[in-house]
Amino acid sequence: MGHRRHHCGPHPVQVVRRIARKVTAKTRSNLDDLIVDKLEEPLVLALTIMALRAGYDQLSFGDSVDDFVHAAMVVAYTLNVTWGVARLVDAIIMNFFMPYTLSKESAMMDQFGPILRKGLRSAFGPWASSWP
């Protein structure tokens, strides 16, 4: 007999996406659409981390485990914020800076954008692997 998958409601990613798209649909700027597009996944992860924390707060394992979980949550929040900032900075470079450099007829400007982008990827380390 196959397992039935119970559906409890809309997926959190879809909820966040729907709300964000409604808010940004009223503006003419592409900047807010870009911000929403790049911060959707980090926002969903932040909500997941908060839900995990709220669930853990209902349990009791002792002070040493609590300290460990607290430290792990701090690391998770830090990595998530770093991931969101990295995605946002990369999107700004690709959508605003790169078109500007392409409009200039300078060999140095043609190379500056990709060098800046690769430098940021190496600075942000493993989180850069999720970048296109």
Image (cartoon, rainbow, N blue to C red):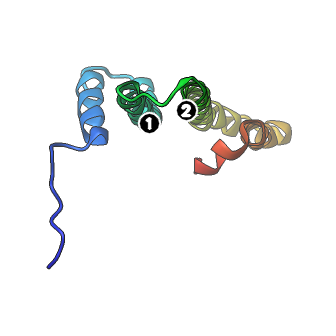
Residue 2 location, quadrant = bottom left
- Mark 1, secondary structure of its residue: helix
In the displayed structure, does residue 104 sit left or right of residue 81? Answer: right
Farthest residue in the front direction?
Answer: 62
Kindly tell me whether residue 31 is visible in this rendering: yes
Residue 132, percent across and down?
58, 51
Say few, some or many: other residues with alpha carbon within 10 Å of mark 2 (under 14 / 14 to 19 / 20 or more): many
Q: Are marks 2 and 1 in contact (CB under 8 Å)?
A: yes
- The residue drawn where x is 39% and y is 35% is 48
Q: Quadrant of the N terminus?
A: bottom left
For this rendering, which residue is in front, 48 or 93? 48
Q: Is residue 67 above or below residue 45?
A: above
Kindly tell me whether residue 96 is visible in this rendering: no
Q: What residue type is labelled 2?
A: Asn
Q: What residue type is labelled 1?
A: Leu
- The residue drawn where x is 62% and y is 36% is 90
- The residue tagged 1 is 45
In the displayed structure, does residue 98 sit left or right of residue 55? Answer: right
Residue 84, percent across and down?
54, 31
- The residue tagged 2 is 80
For this rendering, which residue is in front, 68 or 72? 68
